[in-house]
Amino acid sequence: MSTRREIIAGAAAAVLAGSLGGRAAWAQAPPPGLDEFYLPPATAAAALSPAGRRAAVLRNRVTEGGVEASIDIVDTAHPTLPPTNLKLGAHAASSLVWVNEKRLLVWMAYDLARKGEPPQSLVRVVGLDADGGRPAVMLGERDAAQQVGDLGKIVDLLPDDDDHILMLAWEPIRGLPALYKVDVNNGSASVLEHGVLRTYNWLTQDGVPLIRLDGDGRDVVTHIMLRGAGDSGWRPAKDIRRDQTPDFTIFGPTGKPGVFTAASRTANEDKVSVREVDLTSLALGPPIYTAAKVDVDGVWSDRRGHALAATYAEDRRSYAFFDKGFQPHFVGIETYFGPELSVELSDVNDARTHYLGVAHGPREPGRHFLYDRTSRAVIELGEAKPHLAGRLGRGLPMAVRTRDGADIRAYLTQPASGALGPLIVMPHGGPEVRDRYGFDPWAQALAAKGWWVLQVNFRGSGGYGTEFAKQGWKRWGDRMQEDVEDATAQALAEHRLDAGRVAIFGASYGGYAALMGGVRRPELYKAVVSVAGVSDLIDILRWERSEDDTSTKEFYNFWRDRIGDPETDEAMLAKASPRRRAAEFKAPVFLAHGILDSTVPVAQSRAMAKALTDAGKRVEYWEIKKAGHSPGSPAAERELLARCIGFLEMALA
């Protein structure tokens, strides 16, 4: 364990100079191989006991036989002393939490092998005392537990009950998700209530479930269900999309009965703000905090779910603390880690004397730390991926002025060597989400090949307010593409990159943008990679309409408003559909699509592959069995990325 201890006051200049000086050696290390991005984190997580007397730090160690997990128990009053180490065995671990001063819960991963089938990954929560005693698997007494992949969903830690927590798990007798009350000492459980077939969470206040979150059949929409103190059953309250930046998100409870904290915007507001919501009427209170340039994207809360700060990101992660006295401390922590890293807080004790967090940036996957508010000391606890230190590419924020005078943001990742070379343009999915300045394993895996990688928050992206998103509505085929092209031209010019070796690579909406880029700029892009991408806007809209079983067609209307109306905008939509313009491609195209995709049907890539083949174009198509809109597992994602990189290597050679 790293126990470097620095007093922030008076040390900032020296620390910053040291950190910058250390970066000079980074270019000397060899770039990482793809497998190295998928190793489990060496320091996976950290958690504070409720009183803050101890911190538990979760470690993974890769051995010849696999992965071995352990926990270091750190005395926060004497953090430089050697910790107590608890061995967890030959399994990877991902997270942990204290349920009281003496007992921990740890998320463990196991492989279950069945004859003739690939190994199934199982997630289990294991309880143990701080000395390693009394281990017990939560929900472990059920024979049917071995049939369930993930039994790791905790709904409420019940901070006023040292012996129980609430968990969500599949209940095999009725075949429904259920809310269980679980004894943390032995793992035994009893059902409190059942959900419906696609319930994926409950939110509680003082241990009472007041909000239920139900998915739809395509994992695209969440149905928010409410149950007030006098309600006999659940009532529908609101539907929100899970595939775009949401306009409404409920977080934890306040100290007021039936009142929760939410991030939302009203019909006449541009930015998402933090406010309170009354569950009886869903009435929203006035904004508690609104960021100037971007949407609030979250709330940082204590273990009782009470909000401590609003979170948002322009480039780096930012906090608006409701306890104004902590702001100078946070500034000191940021100064300690330097301007390249964002600081994310993860835990705080009940007395607000000790804090845990992770500092991360484009070439730093994560440095876990403990902060002592009394002494103003930062104690580093370990790195997530120390094997990547000194081997990652630098991230460069870009202010881009578009051809029509708009200002947008982009991020450029350069290879660790800094050498000039090809450029991979990587538009994000959504499209109403956004890229951020931070560690992106896909961008870094591409940079490890010696390529520069450009990520653009084009108009139509989420996170910058409603008006910014609306500037991309019905402009998929022109304005949104133009913003990507303008950022690409600026990156090529500013860094003198090889304009003859540019490729475009995206997934979901990004896959559409890649295909459309191949149509619009055949002279620019030398390779096109589309993963689960849309290829025909008219066909996808017709499919969305056929899949929408609501009486008002609200889900279809969502996309009709953003893409276009097939009845009135047919010519525009046809022009903006790459499948219908396959003859205009010059670059080779790689298509990949999960056969079980319920967000963008596999028919979109099948039709694109056929159109390119019929037009005599170079195309490779890989259909991924047992995959949906995303690969579904780290191993599947690694194989997908390896195939994409292999295709780009050949095309850019």
Image (cartoon, rainbow, N blue to C red):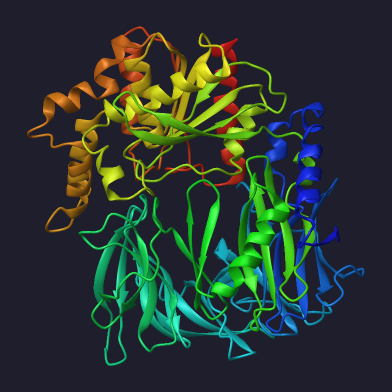
Residue 15, percent from left and from top: 79, 50
Q: Quadrant of residue 604?
A: top left
Number of marks: 0
Residue sitting nearer the eye, 553 or 145: 553
Quadrant of residue 76 within the rendered picture:
bottom right
Q: Percent x, y for residue 217?
A: 32, 56
- Residue in view at x 72 percent, y 80 percent: 52
Q: Residue furthest left?
A: 568
Q: Is residue 588 above or below residue 566?
A: above
Picture coordinates of residue 138 (x, y %)? 63, 76
- Residue sitting farthest toward the front: 10
- Residue at the location (57% across, 39% down)? 637
Q: Is residue 457 at least partly visible in the picture?
A: no
**Left/right of residue 353 with respect to residue 625 in the rendered view:** right
- Please identify the quadrant where the N terminus is shown: bottom right
User: Would residue 12 be visible to someone looking at this image?
Assistant: yes
Q: Nearer the viewer, residue 207 or 624?
A: 207
